[in-house]
């Protein structure tokens, strides 16, 4: 085990559910895997852990949503220009989220790749917060259960699993960027 994981496991063993919540808000998947493993060892009640992990994930995602909701308004005009944030692009994102927001959120939760960007974009687009929470919950429950069961089954390999998650996320991100780049290039070419 790495020193960080040793600390996380020791904290969960001694203080259990109380510390699980803030740790899961900060780093959900690895903490969920470790919680499954610690639950298998008998140090943590898995049912309560599942509830705490889902709530922590929703709180963390809500913070990113809030960042997106406030972020564009508090971002100085020069930075908006640097990042290419225009009112037209915000309107386009808002329109896209109004039509497909639920699907986008669930896909982002289940693929664990574009989660940060999608959660912030949901806030930027002013997606209704109750709708955001409902769709987010639909994606959070199976994802949390999946990682908890992985931890229960093979949790002692959590360091290796963490690197697999990172590699898979990177691979999906590269594939997504490639597909979006090709799509953008074709659209730009069609306009000429």
Image: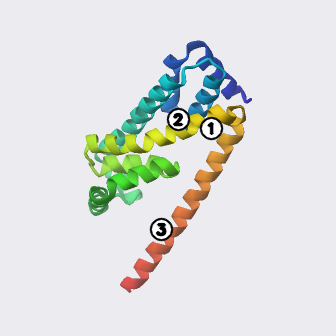
Category of crowding for the residue at label 3, using alpha-carbon neighbours closer than 10 angstroms: few (below 14), some (14–19), many (at least 20): few
Query: Split into 4 quadrants, where in the image is the C terminus?
Result: bottom left
Residue 49 or residue 90, whichever sits in front? 49
Under circle 3, the secondary element is helix
Distance between mark 2 and mark 3 Cα atoms:
27 Å
Distance between mark 3 and mark 1 Cα atoms:
32 Å
Q: Percent position (x, y) of residue 127?
A: 27, 48
Distance between mark 2 and mark 1 Cα atoms:
13 Å
Q: Which mark is residue 150?
A: 1
188 on left or right of 152:
left
Under circle 2, the secondary element is helix
Q: Quadrant of residue 163?
A: top right
Per the image, the residue denoted by label 3 is 180
51 on left or right of 155:
left
For image coordinates 48% across by 68% down, the residue present is 180
Label 2 vs label 3, nearer the camera: 2
Residue 86 or residue 12, whichever sits in front? 12
């Amino acid at each position: 085990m790495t020193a960080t994981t040793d600390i996380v496991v020791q904290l969960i063993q001694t203080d259990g559910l109380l510390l699980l919540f803030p740790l899961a808000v900060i780093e959900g998947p690895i903490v969920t895997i470790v919680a499954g493993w610690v639950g298998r060892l008998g140090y943590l009640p898995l049912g309560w852990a599942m509830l705490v992990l889902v709530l922590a994930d929703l709180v963390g995602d809500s913070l990113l949503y809030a960042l997106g909701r406030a972020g564009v308004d508090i971002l100085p005009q020069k930075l908006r220009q640097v990042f290419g944030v225009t009112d037209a692009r915000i309107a386009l994102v808002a329109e896209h989220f109004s039509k497909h927001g639920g699907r986008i959120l669930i896909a982002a939760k289940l693929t664990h790749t574009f989660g940060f960007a999608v959660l912030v974009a949901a806030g930027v687009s002013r997606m209704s917060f109750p709708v955001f929470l409902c769709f987010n919950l639909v994606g959070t429950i199976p994802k949390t259960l999946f990682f908890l069961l992985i931890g229960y089954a093979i949790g002692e390999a959590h360091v290796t699993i963490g690197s697999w998650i990172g590699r898979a996320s990177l691979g999906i991100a590269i594939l997504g960027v490639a597909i979006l780049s090709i799509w953008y290039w074709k659209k730009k070419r069609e306009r000429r």
